[in-house]
């Protein structure tokens, strides 16, 4: 039974794998982690602000002792609702901005990776073309030498026959 994980890593160009696959994947993962961290922090900050506002409103409600206090509390609720609406709008804009930044950075990473792959493919094609050209030249040279030897062998055989006659 053979071990599927027992392979010779020297047969792979690890630098090429690193530059074409692993480095871009790591960069994208780091970008995703940064976005997640920013989103979690924004959410925690917003939750804290909403919790503080809610607790302050509950404390104000507990302080109500008469009709005038209730009226004052209800008027304050309108202001709190307005402030929370503004806060929600600001938080939504913050999340949208974070997502737009993520998309832009992702596009830059993708463009960079595509450019690198194209350059690598061009270099590989150039190397293959040069190698093929060298092989063709060597084959042509060997064929020329073989033809020359064959021609001189025939000429020598012909001279030998002429000399015998």
Image (cartoon, grey):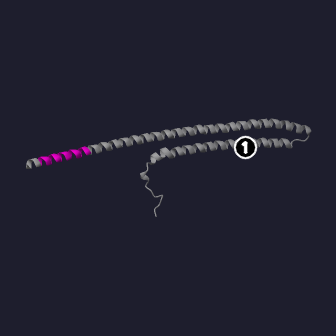
Q: Classify residue 137 as left or right of residue 112.
A: left
Query: Residue 150: x and y, percent?
Result: 20, 47
Q: Quadrant of residue 76?
A: top right
Q: Position of residue 147 (x, y in %)?
A: 22, 45
**Residue 146: horizontal and vertical position, in percent?**
23, 46
Q: Is residue 86 magenta?
A: no
Type of secondary structure dominating the magenta stretch = helix
Total numbered labels placed on residues in the image: 1
**Which residue is nearer to you in this view: 53 or 77?**
77
Q: To which quarter of the image does residue 82 belong?
A: top right
Q: Is residue 164 above or below residue 99?
A: below
User: What residue lies at 67% left-to-right and 39% top-to-bottom?
Assistant: 95
Front-lying residue, 51 or 124: 124
Residue extending furthest toward the right: 67
Q: Is residue 157 magenta?
A: yes
Kindly give the residue lying farthest to the front in the view shown. Answer: 165
The residue under the point 62% across, 42% down is 35
Q: Is residue 159 left or right of residue 13?
A: left
| Residue 12 percent coordinates (x, y) | 43, 50
Question: What residue sits 68% from the left and 36% below the top?
Answer: 93
Would you call the spot at circle 1 few (<14 residues within 10 Å), some (14-19), or many (20 or more)? few
Residue assigned mark 1: 47
Residue nearest the viewer, comparing 91 with 1: 1
Could you say whether the residue bearing mark 1 is in a helix, strand or loop?
helix
**Which one is nearer the viewer's eye here, 119 or 39?**
119
Give the residue displayed 66% in from the left and 38% down from the top: 96
Q: Classify residue 78 by image quadrant.
A: top right
Question: Which segment is the magenta one?
Answer: 143-160
């Amino acid at each position: 039974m053979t071990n599927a994980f027992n392979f010779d890593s020297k047969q792979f160009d690890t630098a090429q794998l690193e530059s074409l696959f692993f480095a871009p994947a790591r960069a994208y993962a780091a970008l995703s982690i940064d976005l997640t961290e920013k989103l979690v922090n924004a959410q925690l900050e917003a939750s804290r602000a909403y919790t503080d506002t809610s607790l302050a409103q509950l404390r104000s409600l507990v302080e109500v002792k008469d009709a005038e206090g209730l009226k004052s509390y209800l008027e304050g609720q309108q202001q709190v609702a307005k402030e929370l609406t503004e806060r929600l709008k600001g938080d939504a804009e913050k999340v949208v901005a974070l997502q737009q930044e993520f998309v832009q950075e992702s596009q830059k990473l993708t463009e960079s990776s595509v450019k690198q792959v194209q350059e690598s493919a061009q270099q590989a094609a150039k190397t293959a073309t040069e190698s093929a050209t060298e092989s063709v030249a060597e084959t042509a040279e060997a064929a020329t030498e073989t033809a020359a030897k064959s021609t001189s062998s025939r000429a020598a055989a012909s001279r030998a026959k002429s000399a015998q006659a």
